[in-house]
Image: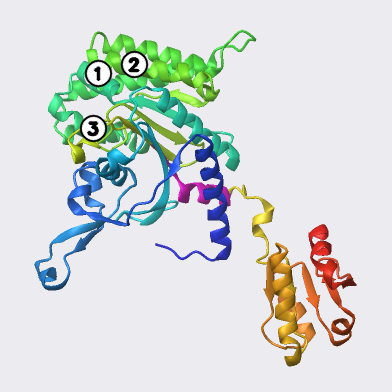
Amino acid sequence: MRDFLPADVRRREYVIGVIKEVYERYGFEPLETPAVENIETLMGKYGEEGNQLIFKILKRGEHEKTGEADLALRYDLTVPLARVVAEYKEKLPKFFKRYQIQPVWRADRPARGRFREFYQCDVDALGSRSVIVEAELCAAASEALLKLGFNNFTIRLNHRQVLTGVLDAAGVAAERHADALVALDKLDKIGREGVEKELMERGIKVEAGDKLLNFFAGLVELEHAVQLAPLDEKREPESVALNQATLGRLVEFVGDHELGAHGIDELRSIITFAEASGVNTRIRIDPSLARGLSYYTGAIMEINVPDLAGSLGGGGRYDNLVGMFSGQNVPACGFSLGLERIIVVMSEREMFPETLAATPADVMVTIWNEESINDSIALATELRDAGLRVDLYTEADKLGKQFKYASSRGIQFVAVLGEDERKQGLIALKDMTTGEQKTVARDQLAATIEENL
């Protein structure tokens, strides 16, 4: 959990501002929820590992000695959203589209780009089972990243029902599916040997584990084959060709498995709908993508950039989660961008606009002497009313000291209201970047500063 100094806050507000602007252009509305939820609201929604990372709050007062917890800091923004929809369903539109940008807390081990308190930038659509929603979410997340300066990223796409079909086809027992998904979710982190070992430790038969991992190894070979295929003008983009080939391989492996076949059809539809916004070329169907959260029921998504461990965001469809609170299933799908990781990458790769390193003010008003304080305050007020950012030096120091302070803060202009200037209705204006100083009529000062910023 960190403190944020002014430069950090400017970067954060810049990223949040870009993401909010994109989400709102897609018709999403803002929502906020409390930092604290009842512990039963959160427990059991995030899988076995997630339960261990929830920050629990002990009962207070006379109950504190029991050592029991009845509240917890929110772990993500999706479960609180589901609670809100269940509670306020009658007040919400048929298709409720919301974005939420707030902090969440996880008792995780801190690492590069991973913190115990961090912001999520969520966008969710509830009320529709159409996979048009998935295509829209991919487009919105993609556009937000493009506007932030990310050009080289991939939206990995899979489907929980496809995973079910693949696991069944490999011979993994139904009661071991959750264990297999937890292990598979680590494939890109610990490699095949690591996953093989974990599958065995979780009670999955060696033959089933081998068949499962051989299938994924075949997909890697397929990807290499598509990448090495000769280029020509008629050839479709590599990502499009790879997606078609992957869908074909899935159909072969899953066969007539009803759930698996349905999931494959939905993946195909998402790709088709994504063509209209042009985001299909950034989507890669990846059957190894598992995502550990247990509430996902359909499509699952994750955004990756080269040379970055972990993702910039992810999400998926969770049609049953609201039903846990209301008893009525409400179809839902969402995506979350990881603000902290985005900021880390943008900082390391120097992707922020130069203007963000800017100064806290456009102009600083000096104080000539004790008698002129009210005049300086009045001048600062006039400039602020004109829309400028104005700092007021708060002591009657030597003028050189005041200039030095303005320079150390990166403030471009300094306004000096000396004895002679006050009598004549003039202001001495110094440009700290050029050293040039000129006299300006007081009623023209704001316009002069604006013209030269």
Give the crowd class for mark 1: few <14, some 14-19, many >=20 residues within 10 Å.
many
Badge number at residue 320: 3
Relative to 117, say whether 333 is above or below. Answer: above
The residue identified by callout 2 is: 264
Q: Which residue is drawn at 55% across and 49% down?
A: 17
First of labels 1, 2 by sequence position: 1
Instruction: Report whether 275 appears left or right of 414.
Output: left
Badge 2 amino acid: Ile
- The kind of secondary structure the magenta stretch mainly shows is helix
Relative to 396, say whether 176 is above or below. Answer: above
- Camera-side residue of 140 and 229: 140
| Residue 120 visible here | no
Instruction: Report whether 356 appears left or right of 311.
Output: right
First of labels 3, 1 by sequence position: 1
Magenta residues (range): 335-348
- Camera-side residue of 42 and 159: 42
